[in-house]
Image (spheres, rainbow, N blue to C red):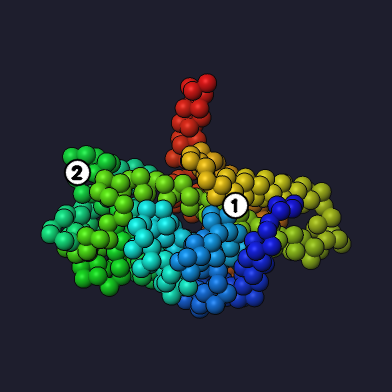
Amino acid sequence: MDYFLTEEQQMIKELAAKIADEKIAPIAIEYDEQGKFPHEIIKILADSDLCGVYIAEEYGGLGGGVFEMSLVVEQLSRACGGISLAFAGTGLGTFPIILFGNEEQKKKYLPDIASGKKLAAFGLTEANAGSDAAGIQTTAVLAGDEYVLNGTKQWITNGGEADVYTVVACTNRSKGARGFSAFIVEKDTPGFTFGKKENKMGIRASCTRELVFDNCRIPRENLLSKEGMGFIVAMKTLDRTRPGVAAQALGIAQGAFEEAVKYSKQRVQFGQPISSFQAIQHMMADMAIQIEASRALVYQTCKFIDSGAKNFSKESAMAKVMASDTAMKVTTDAIQVMGGYGYMKEYPIEKKMRDAKITQIYEGTNQIQRNVIALELIKELAGK
């Protein structure tokens, strides 16, 4: 289907696809098994000027938005959903600065992220603050010209590898969620350390670690926006980055679909390729329908966000739910098409199924997303 990409968007898509096919696909299984972080892929993305596609030109980026970011994520994820997260996770950590940073903060951090010199990460989740983000326990206390952070963040993508962290902490417990604030924390800050690298089911080429703050002192000017804005910073950020998760899921689904179709043409049973069997044809048709429908929703949601829309929580949640559910369905069916071969680790399909699962969980579980969608629908109906 023609989505009427601009010349620059088409170039971004083709370049990301070339990197995925030539550089990521050959190493995807190895990196998954070893849990190896893709530093050299980041270097390639940086040399290709893709790291800053969603960052304004005045800060060294290409001046695109959520749509351009999602185009890159989708193509990289066709080859490996885990490797793509080094790029996507940096987007998640960068958007708080893009949306809420002052000019000084933007000039200090965005150029290095846009050039690929530095990666970013986002610290929101805690042991008791997952779906209930308002349960944050990490604290930030103002002491003179510094904030002192104490607490831990759990399951942080790019944890330990990123250089810049946007972190949400509590500055006034009595105000509940309105007492949260957001901060920029640099990697080598004293009192800021990392937990062990998590041993995950999927996205194993992505590094997931705990962030540990033990009397970590950061300059007062590292506060994003103002005190009490942390929860809003987090929610506004996630509304913009959930389409990135949707794009990751979309890419995983597309990659699995391509592998299944290729296999169906090569696998001969009963004297003919299994692609000639109607049962297989129907499965592939359903996969294609689900992928294209998801792509249409994801792309349109990205364009809606980039158009300057004020409220897109519902649409962002819809895109994430549909694409991630599609990724699980398509990868499951792709394994079925490939039979026993699909279940073997030497083939890329079982990895794609493992990678797909997390897209239904992080940046808000699909159950929470359905709550968001329903509440927004109720508000809209109540206003009519």
Type of amino acid at the residue the image marks with label 2 = Arg
In the visual, does 94 lie left or right of 23?
left
Q: CA distance from mark 2 to mark 1?
A: 39 Å
Is 174 or 66 nearer to us in this picture? Answer: 66
Type of amino acid at the residue the image marks with label 1 = Ala
Q: Give the residue at x 35% y 45%.
A: 232
Q: Find residue 60 and report its horizontal and vertical position in percent.
A: 48, 69
Numbered circle sitting on residue 30 = none
Q: Identify the residue under disc 2.
A: 173
Does any portion of residue 251 appear in the rendered image?
A: yes
Image height of 287 relative to 41, above or below: above
In the visual, does 67 lie left or right of 260?
left
Element at badge 2?
A: helix
Q: Identify the residue under disc 1.
A: 327
Q: Give the residue at x 74% y 59%.
A: 261
Q: Which label's residue is closer to the chain start, 2 or 1?
A: 2
